[in-house]
Image (cartoon, rainbow, N blue to C red):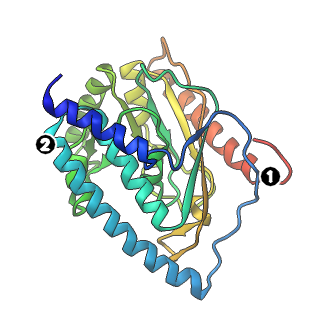
């Protein structure tokens, strides 16, 4: 083992020991305490708290992105990006007094690669998902994120790829790179809605995530963010403390599926996500 790898492993172990990597742990299945979504209604406190949360998001992003890029220069271990994704997510949510609870419907085989398809309510989804995904991964991210200070540099220096939808040829090349990484055992995370919905209703999916999964022949895992919209909304500039709930669903096995099955796969994933949201918002019902 090289010295940089040894440093990396010891560093990860130390963070786990002091608890930074265990603040928002996993819960294997299955019960969530259901609560009908409560709208993030305006108040002076929530307006002020939003600006605090936005400031803290900038601070934690600068810190975590700098650490990620620096650590990546010392070690090419694929776990580095996941480590710093979790540090970023946890430092950000802790500073906002938001706890992230993740439920796994079934245990995942962490020796396998997956395509994690995630619904996208608000900007806070991105760091929160970094906490929730239980294995090393890279993002399939919009090219616009490459221009975001610090965050763009961190994603560039990770196993992630950028998709430029305004240049179809470049998008295809990026998806091919992502597919190659999946075949080498690295999972990827993608928001198939393509943009934030600011809604509890699942929006229309783009096909890219599902083309990628079928081309690589790996399972798709629906990941449902249940209530981020209740806690943070950059559109209305409101935020409040609370608990954010994420459900990691059962992998959908697509062995033998072809591109003709993409509409079916999209429908299955969408139904799982919307079902989780509907169950969460149904009074006196268990998910």
Quadrant assignment, res 77: top left
Residue located beneath label 1 in the image: 282
The tag earlier along the polypeptide, 1 or 2, is 2
- At horizontal 36% and vertical 35% (from top left) the residue drawn is 137
Name the image quarter holding residue 183: top left
Eyeballing the image, is 229 above or below 77? below
Whether residue 144 is visible here, answered yes or no, is: no
Residue 6 in picture, x, y percent from top left: 21, 30
What residue is at 20 percent from the left and 40 percent from the top?
170
Residue at 37% in and 34% down: 188
Seen from the viewer's position, the closer of residues 3 and 96 is 3
Dot 1: element:
loop
Numbered disc 2: secondary structure: helix
The image shows residue 170, relative to residue 143, as above or below, that is above
Q: Is residue 145 left or right of residue 205?
A: left
* Image quadrant occupied by the C terminus: top right
Q: Position of residue 148 (x, y in %)?
A: 25, 62
Label 2 environment density (alpha carbons within 10 Å; few <14, some 14–19, many ≥20): few
Please state which of residues 210 and 147 is positioned toward the viewer in this rendering: 147
The residue singled out by tag 2 in the image is 73
């Amino acid at each position: 083992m090289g010295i940089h790898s040894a440093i990396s492993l010891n560093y990860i172990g130390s963070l786990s020991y002091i608890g930074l990597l265990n603040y928002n742990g996993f819960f294997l299945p299955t019960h969530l305490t259901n609560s009908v979504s409560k709208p993030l209604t305006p108040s002076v406190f929530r307006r002020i708290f939003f600006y605090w949360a936005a400031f803290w998001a900038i601070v934690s992003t600068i810190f975590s992105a700098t650490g990620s890029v620096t650590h990546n220069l010392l070690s090419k271990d694929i776990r580095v990006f996941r480590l710093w994704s979790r540090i970023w997510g946890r430092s950000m949510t802790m500073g906002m007094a938001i706890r992230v609870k993740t439920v796994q419907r079934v245990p995942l085989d962490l020796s396998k690669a997956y395509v994690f398809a995630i619904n996208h309510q608000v900007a806070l989804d991105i760091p929160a998902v970094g906490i929730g995904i239980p294995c090393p991964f890279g993002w399939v991210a919009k090219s616009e994120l490459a221009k975001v200070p610090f965050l763009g540099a961190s994603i560039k220096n990770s196993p992630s790829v950028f998709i430029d939808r305004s240049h179809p040829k470049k998008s295809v090349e990026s998806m091919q790179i992502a597919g190659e990484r999946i075949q080498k055992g690295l999972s990827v995370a993608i928001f198939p809605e393509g943009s934030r919905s600011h809604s509890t209703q699942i929006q229309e999916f783009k096909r890219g995530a599902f083309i990628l999964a079928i081309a690589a022949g790996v399972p798709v895992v629906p990941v449902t963010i249940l209530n981020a919209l209740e806690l943070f909304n950059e559109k209305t500039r409101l935020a409040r403390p609370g608990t954010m709930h994420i459900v990691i669903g059962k992998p959908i096995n697509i062995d033998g599926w072809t591109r003709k099955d993409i509409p079916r796969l999209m429908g299955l994933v969408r139904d799982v996500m919307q079902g989780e949201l509907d169950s969460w918002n149904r009074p006196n019902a268990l998910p």
